[in-house]
Amino acid sequence: MQPTVRDLDTALETLRSEDPKAAQSADSAVQWLTAGEGFDGVTQHALQDFLWYTLPKKFLASVETQLEVADALGRLLEMVGLSRYAAISRSETTRDCIKAWDKDEGLPAYRRAQKGSGVEPPDTEELAWGTYFGLQENAALSGAAAALEMAILAGDLEPGAPGWTKRQKEITRAWLTTSNAAFEGKTPLEAVHAERVEDWLRGRSDARRSLLERIAARLAEPMAVPEDAEKSLEPLRWFLSAAEQEIPLTQKHNLGRAFVQEAAARYDWWDFFHRLTTELEVPYLRKLHHFARRLKLVRRKGRKLLLAPAGRRGLKDIETLWRTVARGLFVGEDFEYAVAEVLFPLLITEGEIPTDDIEARLAPILAEQGWSTRDEWGNSVPIDERGAARGMWDVTKIAVPLGMMSKGGDWQDRSLELTHFGVATGLEGLRARSVAPRRNIFA
């Protein structure tokens, strides 16, 4: 049974009569931990977060004073019957973590200690935790941490024992996927995903939100692998197979000339008369090269391009490769990915569209999101249709060769349309984007 507010007040009075300074320190720590609500909502994870992160990072006091606060809190916890929590407050781990912040080593020390304690909820196949949370995700993390703590107390989880991390994931996954009254009957996983989707839809552009809301209902569940996935991804699979045998690179780490000529001829990516000399002359191939490297499907070693473990898994399993590609279309905060995030929903909802119309509709949305370009005097101005067009054509350089998108009309009256494969791939990528963990760049 957790101590009540009255229990804490009584213990504080006793401590105040014995050691007024320690009582003041313990009271400050308790107020931060409980907000005056008693210990019902305090878990081992929350206590450790306070001791190993909040206290040394946010309490404006010397290391000696911070150590005194931790010790005083331990004394108070012992007095109210929380011996296990008291031991954590007075532990060498707590002392080491507090001291580490004074040496600019605090964050790694905090993360190691939380992970080693066993109550830090791990990422699972269904959910990777972000570095900043909404209310639902924070509640889900706290609940999962409490479930792990209970498993440790029950002897169902022993941190450091063989296979303990696998068991830790099983417990976390079970908790996340079980309906919970605290989440209005939803599973915590469903609640977190719903919160993340709402956060993703929200933004500075009302037009973007209106467009994304038209497809939001189609993003609730993962898409099935399209029947033509193997055929559409053949250029990438061929590229990865070549990397498995090593692709020679130039001194500037571009693809070797012989390989460029072979690829261009194989997929009819070159229709000029002079002889190819570099991958810079084959936009589809250059984009494929950099796309594969960004997704860590291939890796460079000296002047050779080699198949990476992720690429090897993709070659063995078409579903793995397809989902990796789909998610890779929208990963990142660069301009191209902002364009893709609007371009795909536009084509999904409306079918074939003249490129002039696409540019006219992309530009104001991107401008509302804060994207800009430079005018002739070098001043920053909101992105215009010309800038939107550059982003649009950059997206096509990967979408067309991988069978997601087709061009219609001629050079004077061009249009774009998603294939069946492109619609499925776009929806899968946008689904992954919408529920992806939120990252705090200042963490």
Image (spheres, rainbow, N blue to C red):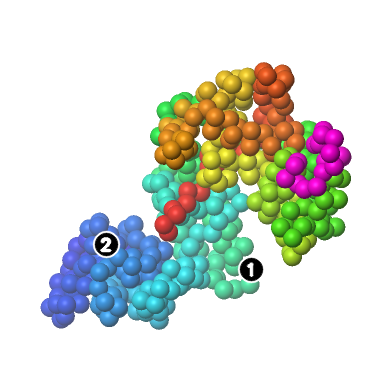
Foreground pick, 307 / 115: 307
Q: Is residue 141 visible?
A: no
- The answer to which image quadrant residue 44 occupies is bottom left
Residue 256 picture location, percent across and down? 80, 53
Instruction: Inspect the magenta stretch and tell me whether residue 277 lies in it.
Output: yes
Residue sitting at 55 percent across and 67 percent down? 157
Q: Secondary structure at mark 2?
A: helix
- The answer to which image quadrant residue 336 occupies is top right
Residue 354 picture location, percent across and down? 63, 19
Residue sitting at 14 percent across and 77 percent down? 20
Q: Which mark is residue 32?
A: 2
Disc tally is 2
Residue 133 picture location, percent across and down? 42, 50
Foreground pick, 38 / 350: 350
Q: Secondary structure at mark 1?
A: loop
The segment highlighted magenta reads 264-282
Sequence order check: which comes first, mark 2 or mark 1?
A: 2
- The answer to which image quadrant residue 93 occupies is bottom left
Q: Which mark is residue 148?
A: none
Per the picture, the main secondary structure of the magenta-coloured stretch is loop
Q: Amino acid at mark 2?
A: Trp
Q: Which mark is residue 163?
A: 1
| Residue at the farthest front position | 377
Residue 242 picture location, percent across and down? 83, 52
Left or right, 87 with respect to 395, comes to left
